[in-house]
Amino acid sequence: MQRAVFCLCPLGWAPWSPRLVEAVVLGCIPVIIADDIVLPFADAIPWEEIGVFVAEEDVLKLDTILTSILPEVILRKQRLLANPLMKRATLFSQPALPGEAFHQILNGIAWKLPHQKSINLKPGEKILNWTAGPVRDLKPW
């Protein structure tokens, strides 16, 4: 996967799949073959800019779709994937570090909680600033 330009990320048996995270961590352009998927960490990862979306009904045209992507578009996507913040947004460290997956999840939950709708946030600014407690507070799965 590390040497691949494209990594196929079809819909799995569940609404989630590690394929997307693996592609981002390895710097491989995710080819998302999943209609109506809700993508994780959307605040931190610009999926539309780094990925290639293929409708499930077009999977037989995959070769044509991927070979028609211009080299400069591929290079732009690879440069975005090379950004350390992109990879960081998918990782779980102990203790949790700002910008990592743990914080992405908490901020996603925070958006679903009742909050003042008139709050004007700057791009990248979060509703709540989370801090993790000591490592002993974080339990592995």
Image (cartoon, grey):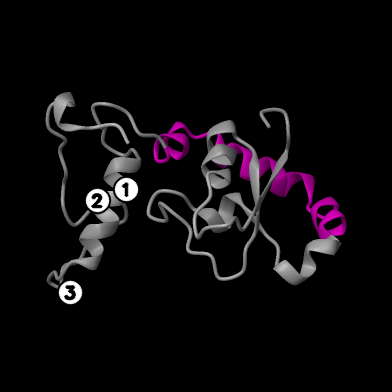
Question: Would you name the residue on which mark 3 appears?
Answer: 117
Residues marked 3 and 2 touching at CB (< 8 Å): no
Three-letter code for the amino acid on which mark 1 is drawn: Gln
Q: Does the magenta stretch mainly form a helix, a strand or a loop?
A: helix
N-terminal of the pair, mark 3 or mark 2, is 2
Rendered position, 98 above or below 122: above
Q: Residues within 10 Å of mark 3 (few under 14, many from 20)?
A: few
Question: Would you name the residue on which mark 1 appears?
Answer: 104
Q: Residues within 10 Å of mark 1 (few under 14, many from 20)?
A: many
Give the extent of the magenta segment. Answer: 62-90
* Camera sees residue 122: no
Where's the C terminus, which quadrant?
Answer: top left
- Which mark is drawn over residue 106? 2
Mark 3 or 2: the one toward you: 2
Mark 1 or 3: the one toward you: 1
Snapshot quadrant of residue 28: top right
Q: Nearer the viewer, residue 111 or 82?
A: 111
Residues marked 1 and 3 touching at CB (< 8 Å): no
Snapshot quadrant of residue 122: bottom left
Kindly identify the residue that appears in the image at 85 percent across and 63 percent down. 61
Three-letter code for the amino acid on which mark 2 is drawn: Leu
Three-letter code for the amino acid on which mark 3 is drawn: Lys
User: Helix, strand or loop at disc 1?
Assistant: helix
